[in-house]
Image (spheres, helix red, strand yellow):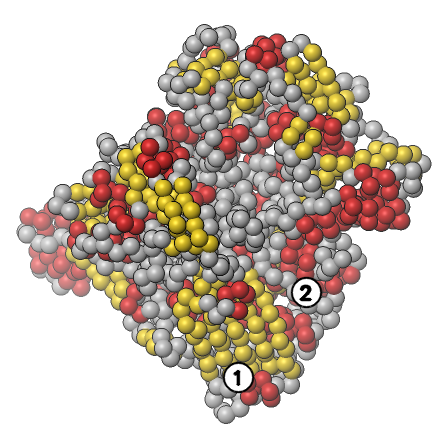
Amino acid sequence: MSQVVGQSLAHESATLHVSGAAQYIDDLPELAGTLHAAFGLSTIAHGRITKLDLAPVLRAPGVAAVLTAKDIPGLNDCGPIIHDDPILADGLVLFYGQPIFVVLAETHEAARRAARKAVIEYEALPALLDIAEAVAAESWVLPPVTMTRNDAQAALAAAPHRLQGTARHGGQEHFYLEGQIAYARPGEQDTMHVFSSTQHPTEMQHAVAHMLHWTSHQVSVECRRMGGGFGGKESQSAQIACAAALGAWKTGRPVKLRLDRDDDMTLTGKRHDFAFDWDVGFDDSGRILGLAVTMASRCGFSADLSGPVNDRALCHIDNCYYLDAVTVKSLRCRTNTVSNTAFRGFGGPQGMFAIEYIIDDIARELGLDPLDVRFRNLYDPMPMNSPLAPAGRGAGGEGGMHDDTLSPAPSPAGGRGERNTTPYGAKVEDNVAPALIDELARTSDYAARRAAIAAFNASSPVIKRGLALTPLKFGISFNATLYNQAGSVVHVYADGTVLVSHGGTEMGQGLYTKIRQVVAHELGLPASAVRLAATDTSRVPNTSATAASSGADLNGKAAQAAALKIKTRLAAFFATQHGLSADAVSFADGEVRGGSHSMSFADLAIAAYRARLQLWDSGFYSTPKIHWNKDAMQGRPFFYYAYGAACAEVAIDTLTGESKVLRVDILHDVGKSLNPALDIGQIEGGFIQGMGWLTTEELWFRPSGAQRGRNMTHAPSTYKIPAASDVPPVFNVKLFDNANVEDTIHKSKAVGEPPLMLAFAVFFALRDACSAAIGKPAPLQAPATAEAVLRAIGGLDA
Amino acid sequence: MSQRPIQFWFRGQLVPVSQVSPQRTVLQWLREDQHACGSKEGCGEGDCGACTVVVGSRDDAAPGGVRLEAVNSCIQFLPTLDGKALFTVEDLANGDALHPLQQAMVDCHGSQCGFCTPGFVMSMWAQYDTRQATGGGVPSRDEVNDCLSGNLCRCTGYRPIVDAACAAWEAPAQKLDRAPLRAVLDTLAAMTALEYEHAGQRFFAPRSIEALAVLCETHPEARILAGSTDVGLWVTKQLRDLGDILYIGAVDELKRITVAADAIEIGAGATLTDAFAALCAEDAQWTDLARRFASVPVRNAGTLGGNVANGSPIGDSMPALIALGTRIVLQKGASIREMALEDFYLAYQKTAREPGEFVRALRVPRRREEVLFRTWKISKRADQDISAVCAAFALRLDAGVVTQARIAFGGMAATPRRAALAEAALQGQPLSETSIRAAMTALAQDYQPLDDMRATAGYRMQVAQNLLWRLWLEHAGSAVSLAEVSA
């Protein structure tokens, strides 16, 4: 039989998806007596509640109860790390749209209508809305952190060239198509089962238990599938799960809380926006000698996951580049806005945005092609030649390009040797960036197109085109070592069918499909013989979030371990029956074979059951080799790195600032793919999502007036994610041929987050076009909306 | 009032519905009353498409006399289905055999989380079945992109979905049997006009202009409803009670589009899809605006009359209609009056429509060779977005001299409005770089735009001026648009 692993099997729920039969939480048949909940939200960014009259809410048609912080028997907190995240505001409002109460009613609509009837008065307090205000006030959710290697200031002072700059990028709304939802069902003897659309069932379990002052074994949390997550249902689902469970506990009735889209976008956290200031020193070739960066992020009103997000930003400011003398200061700003959270990339995109901008600046300062400068700064092994060399240079970009052959750079002062250690002390042992970039530069015809674009721009006054090729290196594993563990339980039933439970969650990425392939492969079964059970804390405990791209890495290994135990036991049983050595037994094509004997897996299963053999087992996995000292910001936080690169060509209209992506070529490293179709799906989807972040997706909080601090981009009518027509008309996506050097599940690599950062190619191509329009480096900021583009080319100066 | 239930074709039979609020949405009815959960709620405002269903209606010009159109069920009120057929994602498969489109979605890996998928499938099905019936053949990628302009997917990056829409054509065709459906729709059409009441709230769906005029006069406080692409949000987002509803969508005469010698008369009930088809046929300058105006489902449900009557400062049809000198026809009782469209707008969301009066039609002057007409919409996203600025220019040129200048903008003031000073700067002048520069300067005095989430005031003004410059460049033959650039 063909191997199941490595095949492009369809998503295990694909048939259900396309026929509308896949059940999301709002589709589950409701139990009789189900109540529907809605939050009452604050209408001020910061203030004390001086009056809270909920009598009109209680009087509204269909209302059963109204609950406030006072009704919470345990901890009024749903923060994942630090306990600063109230489920319901208790006297103090910290952002516009913060939940103050929850109303329970007979229908969803009745609850929403009633929620608006509260009479709330506030004593307003000063509100900090953005990074600049928070930095000026030294308002932090967590203390600043600095990551340093060598003496950046000395290197800056000694560098032949020095450049200061700033850049910023916006936040990003997750816009999972299925909004936040939880359905809590009270059970006997103080127990609660919560259906939660969450990436982190165990954390939901803990939050609900803490809120009710219960223990973990009283609460179970289940999630069969989410309609998208992207990080937005890692910690942010807790408030919804807790409020539903609170209602169920209080009334003894099942309670469903489904947020209306506007409420969802108003009250849940988003990707952190960042502002960067830097001072960089470099040589004539553009190689960075010293770098000092301050990165400030808008964390919002509470810490949430801002600590690890900002740590990951620090650990990705190097991207693919060796930074010898570097100091990076990370400021974690407390503002009176939603608490920003995990979002695909988790700080990685933010850190990498900075270094890509810095390198782009260096290239433009020196009149070099940015790709040359990128190449010269890569970690060892260094390429000896620029990828542009063989194809010839053409007319070059702005100001032409530099010499094509690089002499090997002298080792940095002090003889520290190879340029392959990150600023946080980890050695880059699997660097494929040079080869990958080289291949993409050739297959995308970068050099020739660079020349053609320069020629086009010389004769096109209104439309300008731009080109960029950007690489990525993304660390795989949770920075916090403890999360890098997973469990699984594999049931083989006596008829030979298999049910797999594991701690990962399915949000569309295809995790269940990959796990199915892994288990089917191990037991020599067709994928159809293996079914995945809904993720449930009562089946597999103490799960980590399905996050950090780690779902298949961790849970795949755990499921494989469980299957292997069963297989080993069955092989020994079969071998004993036929007088064989267990090594001679193989599992394939739904059959078990050894010597001249064979039987179907199903027959073996029933025989083993009758012989009183354990047909089910559990598996556990913890990632090896990793360690992390959070205080020193040193260690090996990542098991390995995933790599990729994209080349994008764009055009801008210099009269309106509108832009269009014309062509994109992607080469991405997924190791040895478990499922190429699913991996390409992640790459394309991640790229388009990243493109949205950097182009059309703009969050806008009202800067002044009575509704100061209100997010006015709280619906798809005002917040614009990419649509079908925004996809590049030429879109070539390929997998880079590369088995993981580490022992990962079938030598594959994680794929969830890294491709988002491929979208830098679009942003820097836009900056290239803007710079072509004005003949100097354009100060383009992200998102590069039409207005931002026009501003960057000076079109709004008049 | 003569009561009968709302009646429509659903799951192979005629379904009578009563005892539901007239402002209950089709999606609420499907999910909560029928427990048919294939259609999803993603946004509740017609912007994401997860709730997309297909509505079948009588149309002699359509294949088999049945028109199939994708609409957003989250903002359609249930009584508007009266006399129609409703199809959802659950209707497509034949037992265990998936529809070719569904199978292609599986084979092309077109679903990831799957939540948006039913809506995509329905948008594609309306296109597929219509093209099968008309012999339209495999759609181009651009046609698929337009078909999907109202469906958001956050997982896939769309490529495999577009592939699926094309790949479905490789399988044997599976077509809706239209003849029996048409017969059912004819039966429904023979029933009395719907006058529906629930809990004191009434929903009138007259079948003739005369009946509409009578109802308008006798119920001047009733909310006139056309496509509900905006009014729907008053209910789903603002949670408003609409009171009595006077639905114009059952008045066939109001949907008529007549091309006369001097003007195209577009009935107030004509959908945006139909209205733009007529306008684009008249002048290709409308094409880009028509595409960017809104998504296909919104264009299918929304009407040009509704866009105009609603009077939003960011309504995208009005600048071009005003620039062309469109007149609006209003009716009250038996009396009909008309006025220049720009005179219809009095102040922010305030129009000249009197109580008891309704918009009957729009009269758009025919294209004239000597008139230089251009209209552009500028927004963050190309498809299904709201304008930062919407511009329209109609300059009558006689021997190179501007003998009549009509310039109108949306997004620049409290109403769609003409730019009097910019027009004056061009009036009587040769169209030249000099006169255009003067008009650009004058424009700064015409408007005081606002800062909001779509754009700053500065950007709006600059782009408005730059579009005048683009007009000149195009006229001079030296402008290139983004649409013309490819890799």
The part of the image, by quadrant, that contains residue A165 is: bottom right
**Which subunit holds the residue at mark 1?**
A
* CA gap, disc 2 and disc 1: 27 Å
- Viewer-closest of A402 and A226: A226
Q: Which residue is mark 1?
A: A152
Q: Is B363 situated left or right of A285 in this image?
A: right
* Residues marked 2 and 1, same chain: yes
Which mark is on residue B26?
none
Q: Is there a contact, CB below 8 Å, between mark 2 and mark 1?
A: no
In the foreground, B452 or A580: B452
Residue denoted by label 2: A778
Tell me which label, 2 or 1, sits earlier in the chain.
1
Q: Horizontal and vertical percent for residue A184?
A: 26, 43
Residue drawn at x 79%, y 58% is A459
Relative height, residue A469 to residue B134 (above, below): below
The structure residue drawn at horizontal position 58% and vertical position 84%, both measured from the top left corner, is A156
Dot 2 surroundings within 10 Å: few (below 14), some, or many (20 or more)?
many
Q: Find residue B138 and report its horizontal and vertical position in percent.
A: 57, 34
Q: What crowding class fits label 1: few (fewer than 14 Cα within 10 Å), some (14-19), or many (20 or more)?
A: many
SS state under label 1 = helix
